[in-house]
């Protein structure tokens, strides 16, 4: 499985963006799929994770604003981001809880989200 994230961009505070992550392989065998983010000077942090059963867990700082979803038939995961704040600006990465060939955990390349006031 390989992951390709897209959908980032520049938006004003209060706006919305929808991130997508396309998997080259079948994600129906992967239990946890997640979105992380990394802002300049900060550690990468988990934003949201969704199980194969569709159970979603969110970081407190995005609860009520972001929604993670997955479409196993299309090998896609999504992150709908509403009511964006300046502090949401970061590079967003998708992650699959699966073997990457040498280690456990597969990362896609990031997509940049910029939020202006």
Image (cartoon, rainbow, N blue to C red):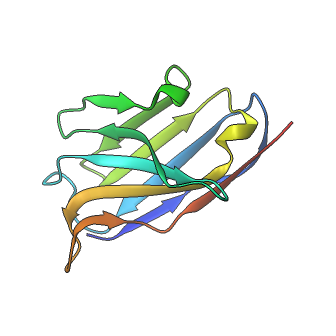
Relative horizontal placement of residue 81, taking residue 20 as reference (left or right): right
Relative horizontal placement of residue 38, taking residue 11 as reference (left or right): left
Residue at figure coordinates x 48%, y 41% from the top left: 79
Residue at figure coordinates x 57%, y 42% from the top left: 18
Residue at figure coordinates x 17%, y 53% from the top left: 30
| Residue 46, horizontal then vertical, whole percent | 43, 44
| Residue 60, horizontal then vertical, whole percent | 48, 26
| Residue 27, horizontal then vertical, whole percent | 22, 56
Q: Quadrant of residue 70?
A: top left
Q: Is residue 108 above or below residue 70?
A: below
The answer to whether one can see residue 58 in this image is: yes
Quadrant into which the N terminus falls: bottom left
Quadrant into which the C terminus falls: top right
The answer to whether one can see residue 7 in this image is: no
Residue at figure coordinates x 53%, y 51% from the top left: 37
Q: Quadrant of residue 65?
A: top right
Residue sitting at the far right: 117
- Between 31 and 74, the one lying in front of the other is 31
Q: Is residue 43 above or below residue 79?
A: below
Relative horizontal placement of residue 26, taking residue 37 as reference (left or right): left
């Amino acid at each position: 499985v390989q992951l390709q994230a897209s959908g980032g961009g520049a938006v004003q505070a209060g706006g919305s963006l929808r991130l997508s992550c396309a998997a080259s392989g079948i994600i129906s065998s992967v239990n946890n799929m997640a979105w992380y983010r990394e802002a300049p000077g900060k550690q990468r942090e988990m934003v949201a994770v969704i199980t194969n059963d569709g159970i979603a867990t969110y970081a407190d700082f995005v609860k009520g604003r972001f929604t993670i979803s997955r479409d196993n038939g299309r090998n896609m995961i999504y992150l709908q981001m509403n009511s964006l704040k300046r502090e949401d600006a970061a590079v967003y990465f998708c992650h699959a809880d699966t073997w990457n060939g040498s280690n456990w955990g597969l990362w896609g390349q990031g997509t940049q989200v910029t939020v202006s006031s």
